[in-house]
Image: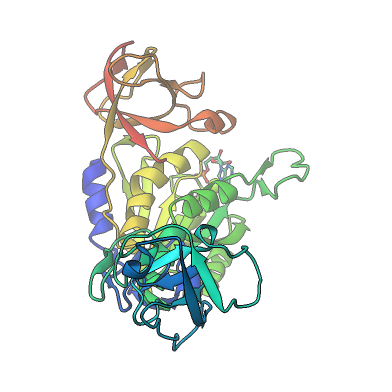
Amino acid sequence: MITVEEYQESVLARVEPLAPRRVPVAQAHGLHLAEDVTAVLAVPPFTNSAMDGFAVRAADVSGAPVSLPVAGDVPAGTTHPVAVPPGGAVRIMTGAPLPAGADAVVPVELTDQPPGAVVLPPAVEVRRAVAVGAHVRSAGEDVRPGDTVLAAGTLLGATQLSAAVSAGHGELLVRPRPRVGVLATGDELCPPGTDPGPGRIPDSNSVLVAGLVREAGCEPVVLGAVGDDPERLSEVVAAALPGIDALVTSGGVSVGTKDVVKAALADRIGFTKVAMQPGKPQGFGVLDGRVPVFALPGNPVSVLVSFHVHVAPGLRRLLGLPARLPLARARAAVAWRCPAGRRQFVPVVLEDDGVDLPSVRPASAGGSASHLVASLAAAEALAVVAEDVDAVAPGDEVGLLRWS
Ligand code: AMP
Ligand code: MG
């Protein structure tokens, strides 16, 4: 048996980040930036009005109320605004460029003009003085060309994308979303919602792994369930490889008589016993020199644990992110038993009881048994217990691997 860390290292040593790709901003949501983004445009790109009103020289309205002749109209989108002559005004709309000569905007509410769509008046009465710069948004007030708007590694959400667009970008260099094949194995599996009949069970691992893949920021490519037929499995894998960046299989990796993944892939990927519970049998390799394959054991709890401990770090590496998540700490709320010599990962429910650390209790009453799939629904994290511990008592400190 090798340790959890030795196995993690051997996996990560063989996984490379996917090459960055330039994509239209509309396709970049949810992806990570692969380079710093600097402003091409200033924000705002030109000095403009913050209000609907009249562009003036502040000095000309210092003795308000005053009447000024209106020299023209500047709606938003105007490219060559009429200049404001000394002693005059120009009607202006929000977002329109400030005309030459003007240094302030008088909001329409501070004039004799009604708001809304009215004909251009020959003159406007300004009822209140305004300061130089009033209601004027200066070019580059937020960002100047060349300023860094977003740092490499940023997760692109709605506001990050709008910042990039405002700063002049139409495309961004991102880490592409890895496409991850999801393959279940076993003669006993039947599709969700169908009557399993004697000796068969619903394939719950396909939706489990597909969901975990999605939660890890990748795109699942669900390949379905294949029976315990190594030739069929090899065909399905070969057909899927060109369209995927990683593959996660479940089942068929231990020492049963029908361990299909082992039978089909043993010449191309390695199988190992890792000192952990659950999740001892693991397979990993790289197919076609490009596609990392994680062959997980079939028990759903083993799948969940193996995913968070081994697959998720590999997917984060594909995404160009730090592979490891920091381990938090928690206290056991109840006692449970642990296997000697293996690190234990227990799906747990968190209880905030006001003590220094969150308290945790196993999500399933049956302890760590790896077939108790329905109880997994309550689990929020994995409690991590060291190899040399054989029993956890209430109040004992344990590690906590959180995934959200
Ligand atoms: P295996 O690793 O193939 O021996 O499977 C171990 C256990 O996990 C067996 O009880 C299987 O029935 C169960 N199992 C395997 N694959 C799935 C799956 N896709 N959905 C639910 N249970 C599974
Ligand atoms: Mg099986």
Residues 390 and 252: in front is 390
Above or below: residue 63 compared with residue 338? below
Above or below: residue 176 compared with residue 211? below
Residues 308 and 10: in front is 308
- Applied colour scheme: rainbow
Residues 399 and 195: in front is 399
> Is residue 258 among the parts visible in the rendering?
no
Question: Taking the image as four quarters, which one is ligand 1 found in?
Answer: top right
Q: Quadrant of the N terminus?
A: top left
Q: Looking at the image, which residue is at 29% across and 58% down?
A: 321
Q: Looking at the image, which residue is at 34% across and 48% down?
A: 310
Q: Position of residue 289 (x, y in %)?
A: 33, 74
> Is residue 284 among the parts visible in the rendering?
yes
Q: Looking at the image, which residue is at 24% across and 67% down?
A: 148
Q: Position of residue 338 (x, y in %)?
A: 33, 22
Q: Position of residue 105 (x, y in %)?
A: 42, 67
In this picture, residue 136 sits left or right of residue 232: left
Residues 114 and 246: in front is 114
In this picture, residue 67 sits left or right of residue 204: left
Q: Quadrant of the C terminus?
A: top left
Q: Position of residue 255 (x, y in %)?
A: 44, 45
Above or below: residue 336 compared with residue 12? above
Above or below: residue 145 compared with residue 367? below
In this picture, residue 134 sits left or right of residue 258: left
- Which of the 4 image quarters holds residue 30? bottom left
Q: Looking at the image, which residue is at 22% across and 60% down?
A: 13
